Amino acid sequence: MFATSNEVNTDMKFRTIGRHLKESLKNIVRNGWMTFASVSAVTVTLVLVGVFFIILMNLNQVATSIEEDVEIKVLIDTTATDADQEKLTQQIKDISEVGSVTFSSKEKELDALIDSFGEDADLFKQLYEERNPLNAAFIVKTKDPLDTMKAAEKIEKLDFVYKVRYGQNDVEKLFDIIKVSRNVGIVLIIGLLFTAIFLISNTIKITIVARRKEIEIMRLVGATNSFIRWPFFLEGLWLGILGSIIPITAIIVLYKEISTFLEPKLVGNFIQILDFNPFAYQVSGILLLIGCVIGVWGSLMSVHKFLKI
Amino acid sequence: MIVMKDVYKRYPNGVVAANGIDVQIDQGEFVYVVGTSGAGKSTFIKMMYREEKPTKGTIVVNGIDITKIKNSKIAHFRRGIGVVFQDFKLLPKLTVYENIAYALEVIEESPKLIKKRVMAVLDLVNLKHKARMLPDELSGGEQQRISIARSIVNSPRVVIADEPTGNLDPETTWDIMKIFEEINSRGTTVIMATHNKDIVNTRKHRVIAIEEGMIVRDEQRGEYGYEI
């Protein structure tokens, strides 16, 4: 008995879903120009959102890698004995913010300096190999990059510390720029999303005014509000999906081009962009999701008004 | 059965369209609602299928107090009422058959039942042979017959018609009246707002006259009572 009634219900549900799907697709085709306008609104929004998003995420990546690369160079006074150095190591390690301490002998420091001169290196090699003027150093990394300044100040006060260097001004400026661009980007993305929702809801509203009679009749013959809403929900979904095709294709193609172009140039540099895989696909997924959400939201917002009783 | 008790309706613009209406309409009655334009006929009728909600008072239709009904239950309530309009309200892109079937599709009836019922009502309004045509290809009278067929296809206990013959010529008007009387003879309550003096005075039924939102006359087998 129960099984039979359940079967009937399930059968009915499938038929209803089929009807809604058919209705929504028919409406997409029937309101050709309005569909075009809505899809264009989604497309433009998603292209802009996608571009901003990619820039933002890469800035974030750069910021993180810079944060990770920030280190304090502690130049050791040339008068320090091995025992003094040993003591200093321990003192630095005892500072609560410090994560790791690596020793770099003055020969190693010289090699690094000479390397950095590139083609002219040989000249310097001859000049300096006889008498190395450099100091031995500790490379100190803090547990949290943001504590760099604090740790540096503490280290500076210790004995046998000749100089402390961590590129303070550059790092801080860079952090500031990244912070500002992150905030601006987020505000822009939110603004764009709202504009798109309003554009879509207005476009769909125009098509709904034409379909007012249909909604009126549906209500009169006893269709429930959710039954009336379903085709509009699906229509919004189609608009979102259609609207995200171009942005997703553009982003996958362009990001591929950009990463193939930039990656060889960035090798060895501290700035790295996010890998094409999975980043481009993740962004595509996010854009598809945003497209669907704004399509559905815009569509339901505009039908809402006609369902008030 | 429809019972209205002490019903008031004041619109936001201050117009009072119902001013203390008390009335009872029994199952199976045929009732004309008459009155000049703006007297409150439409509001009286719209309140019966909960298109308008009264400011005060209670309205019970088919045993449901529709002044207290939840919004989510209105759709189900409306399935027990058929509504016919002066302007037919047919969907131009659907065929005659589809227009009627539509009323059953939206309440998720099975295709088998839909076909059976649609053919039955098309038979009743004598338009079986035009099932595949579009509304535009039909005359006004035929379109109204389709609209009536749609209103009764889910076997409502009450049919409410707001000036159903307002756009039709006299001859067609009589055809439409015959259909309403046929529906009524099967036990369905018919409530019809009209300006047609000839109909009211010739096909005698109960007449409720409304003036300034009040029932000023309620007679069994009444007269139209207004000069046109």
Image: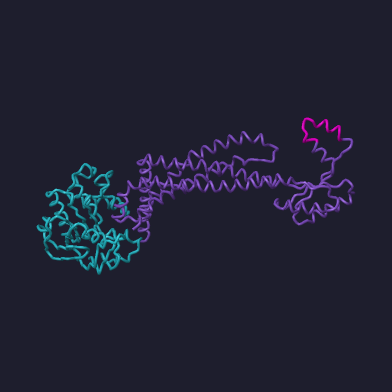
Q: Tell me which colouring the rendered structure shows.
A: by chain
Q: Is residue A90 visible?
A: yes
Q: Main secondary structure of the magenta part?
A: helix
| Front residue of this view, candidates A295 and A80 | A80
Q: Quadrant of the C terminus of chain A?
A: bottom left
On the question of residue B120 being in view, the answer is: no
Residue that protrudes farthest toward the left in the picture: B202
Residue name at image x 86 percent, y 47 percent: A77
**Colour displayed for chain A in the image of the structure:** purple
What is the x, y in percent for residue B181? 15, 57
Quadrant location, the N terminus of chain A:
bottom left
Q: Where's residue B118, x and y in %?
A: 24, 50
Among the chains, which one is cyan? Answer: B
Task: Give the number of marks.
Answer: 0
Q: Give the vertical position of A9 relative to B131 (above or below).
A: below
Nearest the camera: A290 or A132? A132
Residue B16, how many percent across, how many down? 26, 63
Q: Where, by quadrant of the figure, is residue A119 drawn? A: top right
User: Position of B124 compared to A90: left or right?
Assistant: left
What is the quadrant of residue A271 in the picture?
Answer: top right
Q: Residue at x 10, y 58 (%)?
A: B201
Q: Which residues are magenta?
A: A114-128
Q: Position of residue A94 (x, y in %)?
A: 79, 56
Magenta run includes residue B106: no
